Image (tube, helix red, strand yellow):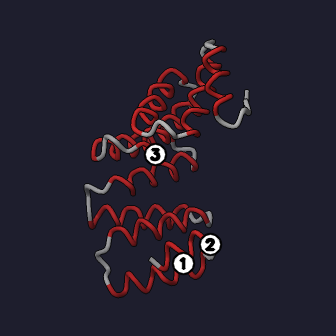
Amino acid sequence: NLGVALGKNEQYKEAIEAYNKAISLNPDDAKVHNNMGSVLNVQGKRGEALIAFKKALDIKSDYAEPYNNMGCVLDGQGKPREALAAFKKALAIKPDYADAHYNLGNTLQNQGKPEEALEAYKNALRINPNFSNASAEMGQCMLKIGKFEEGRSLIKKTDGSISL
């Protein structure tokens, strides 16, 4: 809990110390390894973050969050194929995981696949109708496939900004 609080306050060094202490007390806590990976990723330590996520999965192979987090790191490293596989593993474990659908959509959209991304965003919004980022990205996809009115309408409901 201390590591989470410190991470949210952007005290990353202290958060890592708290996670290391928690791991020394209970090395088989998958959640701590996952949270450590998230803080490492924020710090730009992607390789170390992937190791932490993999450790979490070694401990608990049916834990969707580390797969989702790995997907984000892999996409950030320019490895979309591996990212897509990670998101799909997260969704196989937890089909109602809105963030994984959203991140899957982002990766698909970055690959120039707006129709497929649109479906991922729709899934995220079915699970969480108030997911404004998914709504905005869905609007971007609609613009890209020529559904201008629908796209503009969705974007207006969010922050109103359009990136082309």
Does residue 108 lie above or below 53 as drawn?
A: above
Residue at 50% of width from left, 34% of height from top?
Answer: 105
Mark 2 lies on a secondary structure that is loop
Nearer to the camera, 124 or 106 = 124
Q: Amino acid at mark 3?
A: Asp
The reply, left or right, for residue 29 in relation to residue 4 is left
* Residue 23 x, y percent position in the rendering: 38, 81
Pointer 1 residue: 15
Q: Residues within 10 Å of mark 3 (few under 14, many from 20)?
A: many
Q: Percent x, y for residue 40?
A: 54, 68
Residue 130 in the image, given as x and y percentages of width and height? 51, 39
Secondary structure at badge 3 equals: helix
Task: Give the Cα distance between marks 2 and 1.
Answer: 9 Å
Residue position marked by numbered label 3 in the rendering = 99
Q: Residue at x 36, y 40 (%)?
A: 88
Figure check: 25 above or below 117? below
Q: Residue at x 54, y 78 (%)?
A: 15
Residue neighbourhood size for the residue with mark 2, other residues' Cα within 10 Å, grouped as few (<14), some (14–19), many (≥20): few
Mark 2–mark 3 distance (CA, rounded to whole Å): 22 Å
Which residue is tagged 2?
9
Asked if marks 2 and 1 touch (Cβ < 8 Å), the reply is no
User: Helix, strand, or loop for circle 1?
Assistant: helix
Camera-side residue: 2 or 91? 2
Classify residue 42 as left or right of residue 33: right
